[in-house]
Image (spheres, helix red, strand yellow):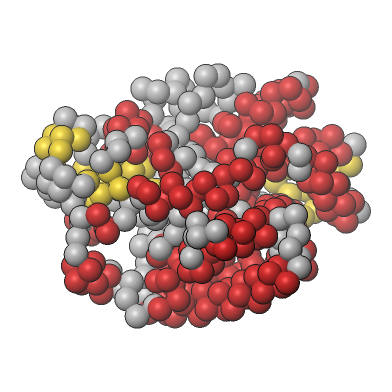
């Protein structure tokens, strides 16, 4: 394949942050995949192309399958991923970025607590926590939906599943955000130092918490993982990495989709009113929030052998960028794709991925959102934007508003 040279794609720009969808549409209009020289990556933007890549068993997330240790070290230096000892041990390696037998073994150790049945048992606890949070905000006429509400729920709930004390959850969010920011494409030395320092602090915290659970096991995921480690199903680094991943995944993306989902409801007031009049639509509305503004719009895969992808031949080791955010607005898959529709069905969006890396926490994230939005609509008769100039986060790997100022009136 010959790389394209006329690509106008600036994922760090303010214009892309505010509205990436015209850029995504331009990519979908191109024939085949599009080469983005800045990252030496082939971008897939059409729904069918993204689906083909992520469901291909010969595509992997880790370079371990296709490069030597020396080659990987060279690539890390070129991308400023080197000289990060704790970040390398616990973040660059994880359940998310592993493949094959390692991925299957680690996923098996935690999967049982994220099934629909197990997640459903948390409903009453989540509802009680959300009710207390709304009680604390009910006398205010204005809030920042992100900082005052959305940011307080996902991390506390996943923290309880894992076994983290409630009072520690705000600090976990800070660590998580400072670590995850380095996965985007703006990898300055300052951001690098921030990610490594926070990974180190997070590691020491989890070491201490693990020691407490070893002395006094509880009915939580940490205790189950300790049993798995003792049984030889994971080593200590895998234990720390998996705990970090679960806590980090339970924070950022759900906070982002709560914010963008609320914003979508306010941008489409007829859909908000429709949801008020028919609360049974909440489950489809939540799925539409993930489709309409995918909170994790970009992932990657590597080809493990020479292969034909989306109709063209690519060599072993080719890096592919799968743009979930673009795929979920593909009009070939979703009629009237740029319209937010709380009753959209079918809605086979790809925001949770596909194949071996399908999102483990999708049931919990959707339950959090169902409870939060259902409670809000019951308790408040009017919800309006205070500032219509909503600023979205910059970057290719995340999608969500930085703040969302609301005015509301109790029902």
Q: Quadrant of the N terminus?
A: top left
Question: Within the image, what quadrant is residue 21 found in?
Answer: top left
User: Residue 259, image x and y in percent?
Assistant: 63, 48
User: Residue 33, image x and y in percent?
Assistant: 21, 39
Question: Within the image, what quadrant is residue 156 found in?
Answer: bottom right
Judging depth in this view, the residue of 268 and 259 nearest the camera is 259
- Compared across the picture, whether 143 is left or right of 243 comes to right
Judging depth in this view, the residue of 25 and 397 nearest the camera is 397
* Residue furthest to the left: 2
- Compared across the picture, whether 122 is left or right of 348 comes to right
Q: How many marks?
A: 0
Question: Within the image, what quadrant is residue 22 found in?
Answer: top left
User: Residue 374, image x and y in percent?
Assistant: 77, 35
- Whether residue 23 is visible here, answered yes or no, is no
Is 220 situated above or below 268?
below
Is 10 situated above or below 371?
below
Which residue is pictured at 69% across the width and 40% down the height? Answer: 119
* Residue furthest to the front: 231
Which residue is pictured at 48% across the width and 53% down the height? Answer: 106
Q: Quadrant of the C terminus?
A: top right
- Whether residue 129 is visible here, answered yes or no, is yes
User: Residue 182, image x and y in percent?
Assistant: 43, 67
- Compared across the picture, whether 159 is left or right of 50 comes to right
Which residue is pictured at 77% across the width and 63% down the height? Answer: 166
Judging depth in this view, the residue of 170 and 27 nearest the camera is 170
Which residue is pictured at 47% across the width and 40% down the height? Answer: 358
């Amino acid at each position: 394949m010959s790389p394209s040279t006329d690509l106008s794609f600036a994922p760090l720009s303010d214009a892309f942050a505010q509205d990436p969808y015209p850029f995504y549409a331009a990519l979908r209009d191109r024939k085949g995949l599009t080469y983005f020289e800045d990252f030496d990556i082939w971008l897939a933007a059409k729904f069918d192309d993204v689906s083909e890549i992520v469901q291909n068993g010969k595509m992997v997330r880790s370079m371990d399958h296709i490069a030597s240790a020396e080659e990987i070290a060279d690539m890390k230096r070129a991308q400023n991923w080197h000289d990060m000892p704790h970040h390398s041990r616990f973040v660059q390696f994880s359940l998310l970025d592993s493949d094959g037998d390692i991925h299957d073994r680690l996923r098996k150790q935690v999967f049982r607590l994220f099934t629909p049945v197990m997640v459903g048992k948390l409903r009453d606890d989540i509802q009680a926590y959300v009710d207390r949070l709304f009680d604390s905000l009910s006398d205010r006429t204005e809030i920042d939906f992100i900082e005052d509400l959305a940011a307080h729920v996902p991390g506390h709930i996943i923290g309880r599943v894992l076994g983290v004390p409630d009072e520690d959850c705000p600090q976990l969010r800070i660590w998580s955000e400072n670590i995850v920011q380095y996965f985007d494409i703006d990898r300055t030395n300052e951001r690098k130092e921030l990610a490594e320092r926070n990974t180190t602090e997070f590691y020491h915290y989890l070491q201490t918490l693990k020691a407490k659970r070893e002395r006094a096991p509880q009915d939580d995921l940490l205790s189950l993982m300790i049993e798995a480690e003792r049984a030889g199903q994971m080593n200590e680094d895998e234990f720390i990495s998996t705990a970090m991943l679960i806590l980090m995944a339970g924070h950022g993306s759900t906070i982002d989709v709560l914010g963008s989902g609320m914003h979508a409801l306010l941008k489409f007031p007829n859909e908000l009113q429709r949801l008020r009049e028919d609360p049974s639509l909440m489950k489809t509305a939540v799925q539409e929030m993930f489709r309409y503004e995918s909170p994790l719009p970009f992932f990657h895969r590597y080809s493990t052998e020479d292969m034909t992808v989306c109709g063209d031949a690519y060599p072993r080791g080719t890096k592919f960028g799968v743009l979930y955010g673009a795929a979920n607005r593909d009009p070939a898959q979703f009629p009237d794709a740029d319209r937010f529709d709380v009753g959209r069905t079918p809605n086979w969006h790809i925001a949770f991925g596909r194949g071996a890396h399908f999102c483990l926490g999708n049931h919990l994230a959707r339950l959090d959102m169902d409870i939060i939005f259902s409670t809000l609509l019951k308790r408040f008769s009017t919800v309006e934007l205070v500032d219509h100039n909503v600023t979205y986060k910059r970057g290719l790997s995340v999608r969500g508003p930085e703040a969302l100022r609301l005015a509301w009136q109790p029902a």
